[in-house]
Amino acid sequence: MPRTSSRTPTYRKRKGYTQALVTLKDAQTGQRKDFWLGEYNTPQSRERYHRIIAEWEANQRCWPTPDWAEQHDPYLQSNAPSITILIRDYWRWAERYYQPNESGTLRVVLRLIREHYGSLPADQFGPKKLRHLREAMIVGDSTATPPRPEWSRKYINQQMQRIRRMFRWAASYEMVPSSVYQALDTVESLKRGRTEAKEGKRVEPVPMELINKTLPLMNRQVRAVVQLQLLTGARPGELLGMRKADLRMDDESGVWTHRPQEHKNQYRGQDRIIFVGPRAQEIINPFLDGRPDDSYLFSPSEAEAERRAALTANRKTPLSCGNRTGTNRIVTPRKKAGDRYTTPSYYSAIQRACDRAAPPPPSPLRKRDDETLAQWKARLTKKQKQELKAWLAPHRWHPHQLRHNAATDIRKAFGLEAAQLALGHASAQITDAIYAERDHAKVIEVMQRVG
């Protein structure tokens, strides 16, 4: 069971001094003790604060044992580069090597290890410090900016593996001895039911009634991608980059095929083919007319132009009065609609539609007509933000859930192998374990007869 969350001791300045400190309470004795951290508001004192908190949490909130070697200069006497330097060099390589989703997640854990052990020589980072860092992942940090929530068990194991990969890479470039990576590899993964880390929520299909409420509130580009996901089981990125040139139209079978330029398993040498049936073809056809072969079918710039045209068509003020169309536009806007949707922008468009479909009831949580979005967010207290988050959770869904919808429907109608082929999995075990929800109706029918 996850531990009961409590307030993390704060980093603060000692009154009348220039030094920083943190006060820790020993869970066994109940006594409090000040731990001096060094010059206030320096990177070194901040790093030592995070390190002491991690050791305190890993020691079941008992005082960490003072380590004389880690508090004095000999601790820094090493020929190996610091972890900050290691992170810098590794990031330059990883940013080009990994796909954007992976590199974005990697950035999170690199920031965390730099925050705790940035000045430490890389060859001094061992299993004990890795466990301390893992404890910081489990408990989170409410004092950080922005606050870092408690990570789930599965996510922690993934982030721990990313840290090991960084040290394996460093060993291959002779930045640290290979024994450092081998020692880190001895730290076991967190097991379900044997750790205080919380369990992540299982991704489930979206109820169709919730999808039907939000579809009318989306522009036609986003709405088309949602419908295509439900019919094909494709990942969002595989459809958002669709071009006319990527489609192969087979008149004999009546089924088109789409080969994405980029997909998740491209680096493994696997091919990805998305099959587009008659119903999906009807959705795509309106986006094909008069479009160059190399342009994207689903364009935010086109969606923005259609939105502005609709506003002009619904204008109530006579054209001879008020602003003329386009005269109040910013010449060089900070953000400009692109020529294709990205997965984050597609996700945001769905979230906005969900919020419009189910706005909070009239209360202090609801945005007033006379305030901007920034003013509304600044007005809400911390408690109100938590209440708003609790309200929005059951009324929101995300695009990856649509893949689960398609997998479940295809499996129920045509079996597990068909779902595996549609989703592009190399093994049916992945489809069975993660995506396709089991058809409990068949089990109920069997038990009604034999049970």
Image: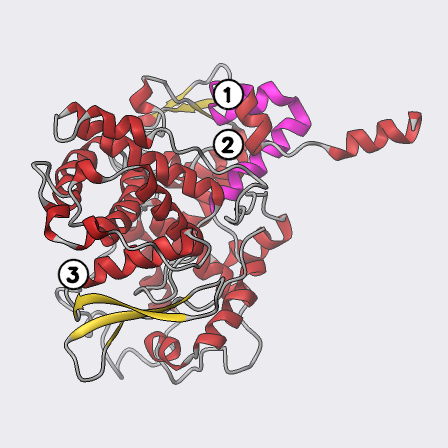
Out of 423 and 146, give the one closest to the viewer: 146
Mark 1, residue position: 254
Mark 2, residue position: 232
- 406 drawn magenta: yes
Q: Is residue 436 shown left or right of residue 14? A: right
Q: Residues within 10 Å of mark 1 (few under 14, many from 20)?
A: few
Mark 3, residue position: 43
Q: Is residue 440 above or below residue 50?
A: above
Amino acid type for the residue under numbered disc 3: Pro
Q: Is residue 352 shown left or right of residue 174? A: right
Q: Earlier in the sequence, mark 2 or mark 3?
A: 3
Residue at x 15% of width, y 47% of height: 75
Q: CA distance from mark 3 to mark 1?
A: 63 Å
Q: Which span is picked out in magenta?
A: 399-428
Q: Earlier in the sequence, mark 1 or mark 2?
A: 2
Q: Is residue 111 above or below residue 307?
A: above
Visual colour scheme: secondary structure
Residue 288 at least partly seen? no
Q: Is residue 79 above or below residue 75?
A: above
Q: CA distance from mark 1 to mark 2?
A: 15 Å
